Amino acid sequence: MGSSVEFACLLLVVSTLGKNHLVSGGCSGKCCRGRDLSCLTTDWRMDRAYGTCYCDEGCVRTKDCCFDYFTECPARDCAVSDWSFWSGCAKPCQPSERVRVRHVEQQASNSGELCPGLEQRGGCREYRDRQGARCGQLSGPAFITSMEFGKGRPKRDHYGDPLDPGEALLHWQAVGNHRCSGTWKKIQKSQQCNCPPQHSFVFI
């Protein structure tokens, strides 16, 4: 009888310890950002050794994560919204820049991919002032901007008109980057002109 009681007590102790281990061991509810040396417990590690293991993002690099880290703390990549529409040019009638933005919808966690840039700037130039009057038609060198911006502008010869082949060596300046400039010379004129995708810019 005594041995049966002792055996029952032993089973109860083992059962209690097992439940406590399940509650306190592993990474359940313990996922931490970055490298956090206080984010630890005692359990089986990924290298099959039993002892102190971690549940922070840094454990992946140091290879001391608890066995269930990737299950309990799955990687989540940053998620961002679509780009907004481009803003108007900051200043009319002169080389300026426009902006578009996007926002973070989900922050990266557990070693997930970090967020990309949230703002883009591009060169632009508007030829109408705030009242809608034409302006800046004759103002120095040709400017280069993106093809998308150029779609909204009328196409015509202007700077150095008439641009006969070989007549003049003209200057260009990249809108939004004063260090990017050069010269160009008209070789011929074509009614059907298609630029390859890698050359998606336009003289304005």
Image (cartoon, rainbow, N blue to C red):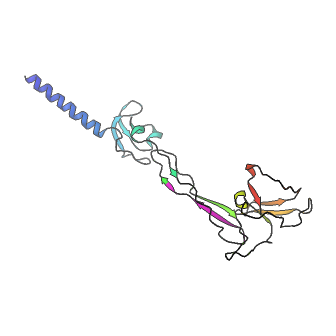
Residue 130: % across, % down: 67, 75
The residue at 65%/69% (across/down) is 90
Q: Is residue 111 magenta?
A: no
Apparent side of residue 180 relative to residue 35 in the rendered image (left or right) = right
Residue 131 visible? The answer is yes
Tag count in the figure?
0
Of residues 46 and 80, the one nearer the viewer is 80
The residue at 74%/56% (across/down) is 201
The residue at 23%/34% (across/down) is 17
Apparent side of residue 118 relative to residue 176 in the rendered image (left or right) = left
Apparent side of residue 19 relative to residue 62 in the rendered image (left or right) = left
- Magenta segment: 92-104
User: For residue 98, what is the image quadrant?
Assistant: bottom right
Residue 65 visible? The answer is no
User: For residue 12, what is the image quadrant?
Assistant: top left
Q: Is residue 96 magenta?
A: yes
